[in-house]
Amino acid sequence: MTILVAFMLGTTNHFVEAFRGDCFKASDILVAGTAAKVADQYNFVLTDGIVRPLILLLWVIVITRFFSFPYIKGAKKRAIMVGAGIVYLVFEYLLFLNVPIFDRFGYEIYPVRPQDSYAEYGATAGFVMTLQDSKIKVPENYSRDEVEGLLATYEDNTDSIEDMPTVIAIMNEAFSDLSVLGDFEAEDYMADWYGISDYTMRGFVYVPVCGGGTANSEFEFLTGLSMAGYNVGVYPYQQYNLKNAYSIGHDLKRIGAETIAFHPYNAFNYNRKNVYKYFDFNNYYSRTDMDPDSPVINWGISDQADYNKLIELYDNSSKPSFVFNVTMQNHGGYTDSLNIDSYVSVGDDYKMYQSMINYLTLVRESSIAYKNLVDHFRNVDEKAVIVMFGDHQPAIYDGSIEALYENDGSIENAAHRYMTPYMIWANYDLGKGQIEKDMSLNYLAANMYELLGIKTDYTGYLLDLQKEFPVIGVFGYEDAAGNWHSYYEQNDRIDEYFRVEYHELTGK
């Protein structure tokens, strides 16, 4: 049993590394259902690293058949043995969950590449550390009175907002511009995106995940809470009680907007069905609410079909409304042929990377669909604001990312793997001109609020913090002078932010 469990964990870790560029963490068990639903989109290939352990496992099974084990007679004795086994397992679980065994050896999970921690300390130690890190920890020197006093210095005008526009926020699956990783010759696959010239604000957001973990980007946008304040491998949607967590859904519903969530896939993925209730969404629409014959390009509903449904939801909603949409088109893997006539052309150096070509083609189609959506709302009478951003860069395993991007180990360089484009567009003049600004994703909703004239104590605090630290990411943070820092460097303002985060997450 020991070797069987070790084989299963090792094999799982292998494929998580292959498909997501990460390691198998305790929190991944909570999203196993979500992973299983998209597993058939990836190619599971047997490698030497799997075959050799499999042969060892089979050899052990055969050898153990030559040994006999004493049979315990009597129901009472067997019940005692079973009870003792259960007590032992419970003891082991509580031990691994609560006693920081590996912390005492100086072990740690590296934020940017946790798989390096597994390689250095062993997968068992790494897995147990991610289990221990899954609990919400009270920040050092936390005082509720201090945090509430700090937030009280900021204005909240949500009870007096009038003439509220409809807000449509789109988190686009794996939408990114790979040119941030390095130069390569290719057709202009984002021409329609960058061709939208009447944007209000545009740039890049630094997201908390790479290659997967969509819900954590969603969490940062909807709550303004940075994943940097939590331990590696945590999925708040799955692991935390979010009933008391701050959410822009609370604000916009209080202002008077009808709140709608829409994701053209399984409604239960990442526990969204429950989380959206906590975040005050009136209605949640999913794959079952789509036309069964909705077109696909990759294997998920196309962005164009998604936006057509989004427009339908908008047309049928009361005004104003807040519609939050998570798309599906660009989800990996990228190995199958696309249902499309033409692919993005690339230079000779990248023609062998078909998965990369498939991905760039999907991004091109996303850009076209988004431009069509913007063009539609140009002709809408009611005021509307559209916010669109990518949730993470893709996990592509044809060698193209390695050929394009070399991680030199610096925080600034690592941050490039967490950059995705964003845009805030309105069909009326917001009176702010055009703004080019990069930021971490936890600031994006606060910046949207500022453009709309909405003020809350927490978003006011975030906007102040952003002036000092434009980027607070899981990989490190950037100061106003453009210098990058590790969290190993003690910083009072960053520590203060994590105390404020704890308050906004728990209400305590």
Image (cartoon, grey):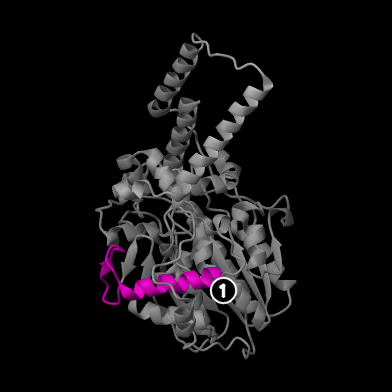
Whether residue 485 sits left or right of residue 277 in the image: it is: left
Whether residue 457 sits left or right of residue 22 in the image: it is: right
462 falls in the magenta region: no
Q: Which residues are magenta?
A: 479-508
Q: In the rendered image, which residue does mark 1 sit on?
A: 386
Q: Residue at x 30, y 77 (%)?
A: 480
Query: Eyeballing the image, is 376 above or below 83?
Result: below
Q: Residue at x 39, y 77 (%)?
A: 436
Q: Pinpoint residue 311: horizontal percent, then vertical percent.
A: 67, 68
Q: Nearer the viewer, residue 104 or 495?
A: 104
492 falls in the magenta region: yes
Q: Residue at x 67, y 72 (%)?
A: 259
Q: Pinpoint residue 44: horizontal percent, then vertical percent.
A: 49, 33
Q: Residue at x 61, y 78 (%)?
A: 251
Q: Can residue 200 be seen in the rendering of this structure?
A: no
Which quadrant: the C terminus? bottom right
Q: Pinpoint residue 34: horizontal percent, then vertical percent.
A: 59, 47
> Quadrant location of residue 209?
bottom left
Name the secondary structure under disc 1.
Answer: strand
Residue flagged by tag 1: what amino acid is it?
A: Ile
